């Protein structure tokens, strides 16, 4: 029985035609290009079949058409909601304040042409087709200057006022990136899990993110590249004792919020005054930048993982200590909610 099967398969795959020797050079080349006889016999028994293409999901055509007809801001977070990433939220707010129509879509740094979010894809509609342009975060400000915005906004700000955001950003990085629990509960889902489903890839993304945050915090303290600063911050990253710089970071953030409250005073907006327009008449770059942190920190405090950390409580107390900053945050939030963002 075994010999019979062996003889059957041998004759099936390896038998050659009797006239296998070509008579001419052209016949020789032609025979080389032909499918070998064993493969022809195989495909005779199991012919190839091409299945039709899968249809698109219900509503996909409508979604594709809608996305081609509007500007899309790609951010960290869920589509249609306010991003909890300060840089993304700043531009989200600026586009709303300028009256430029857009929608948001979820993305990550690896999908961005510049390697960083946010980025904007604009659509222009001609008679023949629709053309799109991708605008990176570094050129979004220039894009806003070139637009015929519905509402005029200030795209400049006093450098001294903007410098007050540096200690606030430091405190934000310390509380979210350099604390094990808050990073795992808040940052990882936003920045790591959205980038890949692979555990290996996710694991490789975590150390560079946290190390970059540690370097930025140490660098802003004007003590870099002191080795002790990095060592203390890295020990804290690994769940060790809180480093000596943590307390100073939160104190400087509290002082920055106090200064911003004084600058805002009784005005509705920070704005940026000119010879013809008094400051506070219209919102602008500083309004969006301050809101990006006051709203983010306020929203994150609702998360139990973040709320239970000592650093988070200090930040929250700094944000909520000034009534005019709370009112400013609410005015900005109302503007974005009216534009359809939750």
Image (cartoon, grey):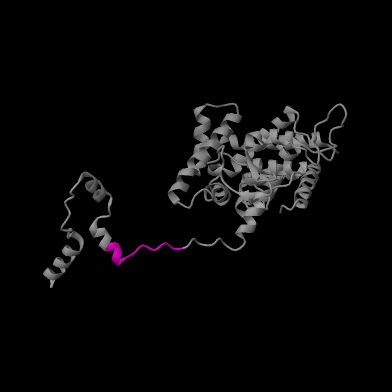
Q: Residue at x 51, y 32 (%)?
A: 230
Q: Position of residue 240 (x, y in %)?
A: 50, 42
The answer to whether one can see residue 44 in this image is: yes
Range shown magenta: 42-51
Q: Quadrant of residue 286?
A: top right
- Establish if 25 lies above or below 63: above
- Establish if 222 lies above or below 248: above
- On the rendered image, what quadrant is the C terminus found in? bottom right
For the residue pair 328 and 92, the one nearer the viewer reads as 92
Q: Is residue 144 magenta?
A: no
Q: Position of residue 118 (x, y in %)?
A: 62, 42
Q: Is residue 45 magenta?
A: yes
Q: In screen coordinates, is 240 left or right of 252?
A: left
For the residue pair 283 and 64, the one nearer the viewer reads as 64
For the residue pair 330 and 180, the one nearer the viewer reads as 330
Q: Residue at x 55, y 27 (%)?
A: 224
Q: In screen coordinates, is 45 left or right of 171?
A: left
For the residue pair 22 and 329, the one nearer the viewer reads as 22
Picture mark count: 0
What main secondary structure does the magenta stretch of the protein show? loop
């Amino acid at each position: 029985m075994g010999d019979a099967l062996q003889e059957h398969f041998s004759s099936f795959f390896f038998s050659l035609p009797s006239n296998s020797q070509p008579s001419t050079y052209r016949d020789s080349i032609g025979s080389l290009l032909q499918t070998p006889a064993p493969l022809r016999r195989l495909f005779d028994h199991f012919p190839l079949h091409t299945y039709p293409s899968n249809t698109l999901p219900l509503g996909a055509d409508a979604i594709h058409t809608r996305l081609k007809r509007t500007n899309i801001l790609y951010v960290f977070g869920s589509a249609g909601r306010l991003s909890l990433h300060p840089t993304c939220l700043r531009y989200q707010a600026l586009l709303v304040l300028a009256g430029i129509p857009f929608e948001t879509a979820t993305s990550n740094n690896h999908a961005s042409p510049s390697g960083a979010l946010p980025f904007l894809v604009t659509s222009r509609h001609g008679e023949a087709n629709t053309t799109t342009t991708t605008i990176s975060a570094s050129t979004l400000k220039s894009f806003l200057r070139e637009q015929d915005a519905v509402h005029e906004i200030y795209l400049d700000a006093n450098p001294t006022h903007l410098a007050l955001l540096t200690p606030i950003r430091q405190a934000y990085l310390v509380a979210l990136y350099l604390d094990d629990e808050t990073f795992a509960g808040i940052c990882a889902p936003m920045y790591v899990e959205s980038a890949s489903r692979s555990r290996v890839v996710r694991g490789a993304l975590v150390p560079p993110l946290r190390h970059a945050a540690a370097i930025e915090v140490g660098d802003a303290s004007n003590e870099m590249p002191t080795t002790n600063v990095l060592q203390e911050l890295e020990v804290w990253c690994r769940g060790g004792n809180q480093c000596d710089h943590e307390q100073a970071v939160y104190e400087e953030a509290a002082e920055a919020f106090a200064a911003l409250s004084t600058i805002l005073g009784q005005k509705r907006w920070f704005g940026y005054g000119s010879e013809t327009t008094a400051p506070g008449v219209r919102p602008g770059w500083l309004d969006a930048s301050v809101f990006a942190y006051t709203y983010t920190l306020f929203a994150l405090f609702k998360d139990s993982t973040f709320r239970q950390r000592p650093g988070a409580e200090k930040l929250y107390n700094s944000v909520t200590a000034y009534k005019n900053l709370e009112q400013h945050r609410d005015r900005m939030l109302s503007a974005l909610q009216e534009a359809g963002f939750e």
